[in-house]
Amino acid sequence: QVQLVESGGGLVQAGGSLRLSCAASRSVFSRNEMGWYRQAPGKQRDLVANIGRGGGTNYADSVKGRFTISRDNNENTVYLQMNSLKPEDTAVYYCYAYSGLTTKWGQGTQVTVSS
């Protein structure tokens, strides 16, 4: 049963913006920390940003000031607004939900930033 569905990736020029969405089932969304990781070719999967059930946020240093994570509790959706994109932001972005015991992952969405 698919519980996390990502959308919003694509190709954008450097300096541009994209917004990623992650729609979750209600049971997943309401009980979990939500966030985004990314993985570039040949590299490990790294945390980009996360948001707690209470709305507290955390960002990787590389995206601070450029990316904003938010959650819509009515739509059971987490968003990642990405501004001032750089070629080094190119990666597959994965949504996740962490309950404190288990982690659920989305299928990933490709973000490509051209120079």
Image (cartoon, rainbow, N blue to C red):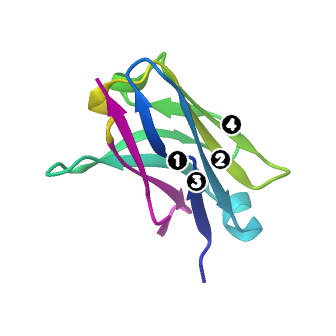
Q: Where is the N terminus found, in terms of image quarters? A: bottom right
- Disc on res. 74: none
Q: CA distance from mark 3 to mark 2?
A: 11 Å
Residue tagged by mark 2? 78
Left/right of residue 8 with respect to residue 40 in the rendered view: right
Amino acid under label 1? Gly
Of 36 and 81, the residue lying toward us: 81
**Residue 72 placement, left or right of 21:** right
Image coordinates of residue 73 in percent, x first then y, are: 80, 49
> Could you tell me the amino acid type at mark 4?
Gly
Amino acid type of disc 2?
A: Val
Residue 107 image offset from top left, x and y in percent: 46, 66
Of callouts 1 and 4, the N-terminal one: 1
**Residue annotated with mark 1:** 35
Tag in front: 1 or 4: 1
Closer to viewer: mark 3 or mark 4 = 3
| Extreme residue in the bottom direction | 1
Which of the two marks, 3 or 2, is nearer to us in this view?
3
Q: Position of residue 28 (x, y in %)?
A: 66, 66
Q: Residue at x 69, y 59 (%)?
A: 29
Image marks 2 and 1: residues in contact by CB distance under 8 Å: yes
Q: Residue at x 32, y 38 (%)?
A: 90
- Which residue position holds label 4? 55
